[in-house]
Image (cartoon, rainbow, N blue to C red):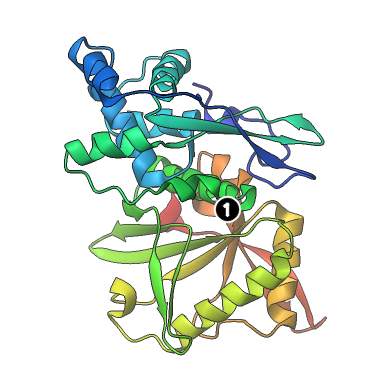
Amino acid sequence: MIKDSEIKAQVSPFAMREGEIKTFDGKDGYVSMNQIVHKINIGHITDIHFAILEIVNDFEFITSRQIYQLLELKGIDPQSQDKLNNKLESLVKSKILTRYYFTSDEGKGVYRIYCLEKMGKYLLASKEIECKWQQSDNTKPVSMIKKRLAGNQILIAYKTKVKAFDSYKVKVALNAKQAGKIFKTNGGIKLTKSNKSIDFIFEVVRREDEWQKKLIEKMRLYKDFYDNYVPGDSGYSSLPQLIIVGEDDKHLAEIFKEIVTSQVEISKISLLFTTDLRQNEDDLSKSLIQFKLDPTTNKYKVENVNLKLLEA
């Protein structure tokens, strides 16, 4: 499989595109549980298929490349992307998983997105694995799916490239006390070095319809959480670091401008920013930036944030 650092993309594959829609690429028709049990009995569905199923269950929406990376991290050798794709095809044909791709004015997307089907939930239940999937989950819009895919890639990047990596959560629930609302981030990372730990949480922003309005609404919830935080809130013994993930550097500047002009800055932390493509670097220690006010010009400027904690 091609390494992250060998990817020469100029635009993130998880960026929004004009006129983009989600297109079904699964299988129609009926498959019985008896047919699936027969495939298990004759060895057509094996442990690696169940490992794939557990990964899809954890991440909700995921690409085949991300599945390949996560299998390797579990110590399972997929052998090749083609062989993995064949296994995914068999799970789609059995309606254990289903599949989508994105189409836009630019044409058909180059990757497929996998998510659970009803039979997949039944198989997970048979192994007493918690599965909260509902059929309505597969109706989520393009923007929500792309946020998940971008979040996936960050979690995988930190797990594979950061020596201080400790653990990750695909979704993190935070409590906005004043609003009386529980809201979710696009993932969390715990880093540990010399018996000291720090938590990162990620908010992925896409250029979807009314993205500015949605961003401000979400930032108000984050501000509520941070302003009213006491140790132990939402499972954090100390304040987690919020990192905002944009589509590209220009998008980060647009995001920061919206935050400042709408007065939803967070006083208790320094906001950090990154982009999808910055995760492709072999060393993530220079993948973060911040916006700092220059006292001489009274204008904000971009500064790289060098964190040795993120070294490979």
Question: Quick check: can you spot residue 165?
Answer: no
In the rendered structure, the answer to whether residue 51 lies left or right of residue 98 reads: left
Q: Residue at x 37, y 29 (%)?
A: 96
What secondary structure is found at the residue carrying circle 1? Answer: helix
The x, y position of residue 155, in whole percent, is 43, 48
Q: Nearer the viewer, residue 280 or 304?
A: 280
In the rendered structure, the answer to whether residue 275 lies left or right of residue 68 reads: right
Above or below 283: residue 172: below
Above or below 129: residue 176: below
Question: Quick check: can you spot residue 53?
Answer: yes
Q: Nearer the viewer, residue 41 or 73?
A: 41
Give the residue type at disc 1: Met
The x, y position of residue 72, in whole percent, is 34, 28
Above or below 174: residue 9: above
- Which residue appears farthest toward the top when viewing the image? 42
The x, y position of residue 312, in whole percent, is 42, 44
Image-quadrant location for residue 41: top left
Q: Nearer the viewer, residue 115 or 110?
A: 115
Q: Residue at x 49, y 21 (%)?
A: 1
Above or below 292: residue 198: above
Q: Residue at x 78, y 44 (%)?
A: 19
In the rendered structure, the answer to whether residue 221 lies left or right of residue 213 reads: left
- Crowd tier of the residue under label 1, counting other residues whose Cα lies within 10 Å: few below 14, some 14–19, many 20 or above: some
**Residue wearing tag 1:** 144
Q: Residue at x 63, y 47 (%)?
A: 142
Count all numbered tags in the image, as a single digit. 1
